[in-house]
């Protein structure tokens, strides 16, 4: 494998029973819904043995208290809190990147800065942060917030949040605590401390972070927004984006658009990895994979059919999707639009739309033999629809085991995916630059002047 050849990025995004809504009902799924650390550790080890870049933990904080007769009919997506889970995973892995989702609406930059640098140090430089700012009604209520925040304000807050966390991470030189002078009784040089004095529109902080700068300088910044504001934020801040596309054309348009916005922020395109979601059912033959997918599709439950804020249960399942104005939160707008366009373009009934789009939440689906799946991955990668993928296995554990056992070796054989980790940190493995500390640079410039 040549070091210079562009390499595919592979992330895995697991939900306890897989991403397919019927994953929890598949005959191979025998677990109950109890949190199970052993299950997660096994999955992380499997991802690392397959040389994945990233073990990604999503977080859609909060839960609605609305109980209806259909409540409880969908697979529980209850999941460990990301930092505690990733800390445990850090202890049993060595190479794989550990990305925690943190919502900027429900945390404080100081709190986040110390948790993230802790994770980075205890994993030996493998932390990443999926910066999200979604603001669902029920989550706001869980946190006692009554006033909805506008989409624009949420992104403005997120920008300021990131700016302050960077300032806090930069409040110490990288080597501040590396040279304790025992003879002189000087533990660290006061010149290596750079107190923060931040007064923003939404957040303020004064003082020093109570932990050393992250090993990686900053954690790897991940972002998953798709709106105009979200794309601009990605171009300015993100080093990896999660996105969704079902056709290569849509993926290429997103790829070119977001990367094309980077130059004005002085960033080069290779400093952002674009990784759309990919749902795979792979088997020895195309037919076998289709049959297995069919088993899942047969188990789909059509209750709880919410669409853009409307309950679809009053409309016939085998009739067309009715014309309904969008009535839900800002975050679901993109997905609503994608579904509406697909249903209209292909004249789909409600049932067909669910079976086409919802079962993979709008992500690319690859169902087939190893060759079918690998060809699709290679094509999207080569034709710049993606730098890699965020693998979202539809059912578990087999869905992910099959991917690592069958697809990964084929990608390695084709020379587009690593056979060994090359770097020490998550950044190094992704080929991302390590951000220096601007305060240290200024200090050295002052000293040299
Ligand atoms: C693969 C993927 C993973 C995501 N993970 C999360 C998550 O864990 N938590 C969350 O609140 N939002 C998550 N989102 C939603 C995005 O953060 C964002 O809110 C959404 O894409 C809408 O983008 P916009 O705010 O720019 O309109 C995810 C989106 C994608 C495509």
Image: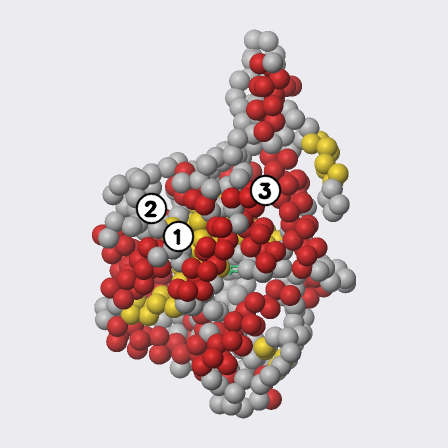
Task: Report which quarter residue 92 is drawn in.
Answer: top left
| x 74%, y 47%: residue | 202
* Left/right of residue 202 with respect to residue 369 in the rendered view: right
For label 1, the SS is loop
Does any atom of ligand 1 lie closer than 8 Å to the CB of label 2? no
CA separation in Å, label 1 and label 3: 29 Å
**Label 2's element?**
loop
Q: Nearer the viewer, mark 1 or mark 3?
A: 1
Which quarter shows the N terminus? top left
Which of pointers 2 and 3 lies earlier in the amino acid sequence?
2
The residue at 52%/71% (across/down) is: 338
Q: Residues within 10 Å of mark 2 (few under 14, many from 20)?
A: some
Q: Residue beneath label 1, please? A: 387
Q: Which callout, 1 or 3, points at the residue further toward the start of the chain?
A: 3
Q: Position of residue 230 (x, y in %)?
A: 58, 56
Mark 2–mark 3 contact, CB under 8 Å? no
Give the residue pinned by disc 3: 115
Can you identify the residue that label 2 sits on?
6
* Residue 13 visible in the snapshot: no
In front: 310, or 115?
310
**N-terminal label among 2 and 1:** 2
Q: Which x, y percent locates residue 184?
A: 59, 9
């Amino acid at each position: 494998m040549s070091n210079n050849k562009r390499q595919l990025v592979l992330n895995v995004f697991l939900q306890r029973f897989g991403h397919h809504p019927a994953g929890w009902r598949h005959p191979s799924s025998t677990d109950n819904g109890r949190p199970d650390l052993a299950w997660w550790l096994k999955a992380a080890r499997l991802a690392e043995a397959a040389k994945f870049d990233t073990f990604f933990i999503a977080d859609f904080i909060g839960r609605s208290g609305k109980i209806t007769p259909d409540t409880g009919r969908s697979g529980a997506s209850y999941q460990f809190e990301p930092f505690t889970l990733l800390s445990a995973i850090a202890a049993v892995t060595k190479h794989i990147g550990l990305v925690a989702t943190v919502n900027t609406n429900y945390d404080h930059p100081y709190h986040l800065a110390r948790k993230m640098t802790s994770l980075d140090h205890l994993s030996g430089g493998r932390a990443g942060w999926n910066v999200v700012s979604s603001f669902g009604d029920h989550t706001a209520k869980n946190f006692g917030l009554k006033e909805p925040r506008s989409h624009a304000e949420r992104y403005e807050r997120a920008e300021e949040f990131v700016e302050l966390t960077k300032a806090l991470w930069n409040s110490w030189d990288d080597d501040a605590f590396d040279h304790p002078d025992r003879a002189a009784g000087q533990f660290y040089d006061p010149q290596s401390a750079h107190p923060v004095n931040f007064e923003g529109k939404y957040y303020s902080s004064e003082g020093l972070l109570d932990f050393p700068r992250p090993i990686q300088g900053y954690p790897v910044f991940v972002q998953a927004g798709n709106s105009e504001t979200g794309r601009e934020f990605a171009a300015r801040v993100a080093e990896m984006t999660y996105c969704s596309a079902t056709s290569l054309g849509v993926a290429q348009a997103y790829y070119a658009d977001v990367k094309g916005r980077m130059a004005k922020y002085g960033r080069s395109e290779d400093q952002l990895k674009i990784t759309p979601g990919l749902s795979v059912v792979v088997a020895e033959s195309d037919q076998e994979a289709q049959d297995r997918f069919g088993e899942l599709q047969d188990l789909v439950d059509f209750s709880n059919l919410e669409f853009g804020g409307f309950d679809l249960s009053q409309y016939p399942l085998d009739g067309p999707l009715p014309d309904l104005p969008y009535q839900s939160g800002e975050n679901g707008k993109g997905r609503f639009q994608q579904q509406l366009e697909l249903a209209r373009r292909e004249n789909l009934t409600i049932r067909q739309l669910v079976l086409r789009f919802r079962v993979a939440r709008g992500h690319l689906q690859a169902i087939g033999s190893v060759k079918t799946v690998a060809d699709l991955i290679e094509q999207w990668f080569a034709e710049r629809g993606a730098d890699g993928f965020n693998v979202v296995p539809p059912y578990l554990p087999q869905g992910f085991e099959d991917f690592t056992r069958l697809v990964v070796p084929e990608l390695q054989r084709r020379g587009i995916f690593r056979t060994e980790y090359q770097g020490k940190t998550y950044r190094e493995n992704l080929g991302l630059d390590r951000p220096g500390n601007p305060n240290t640079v200024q200090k050295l410039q002052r000293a040299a002047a």
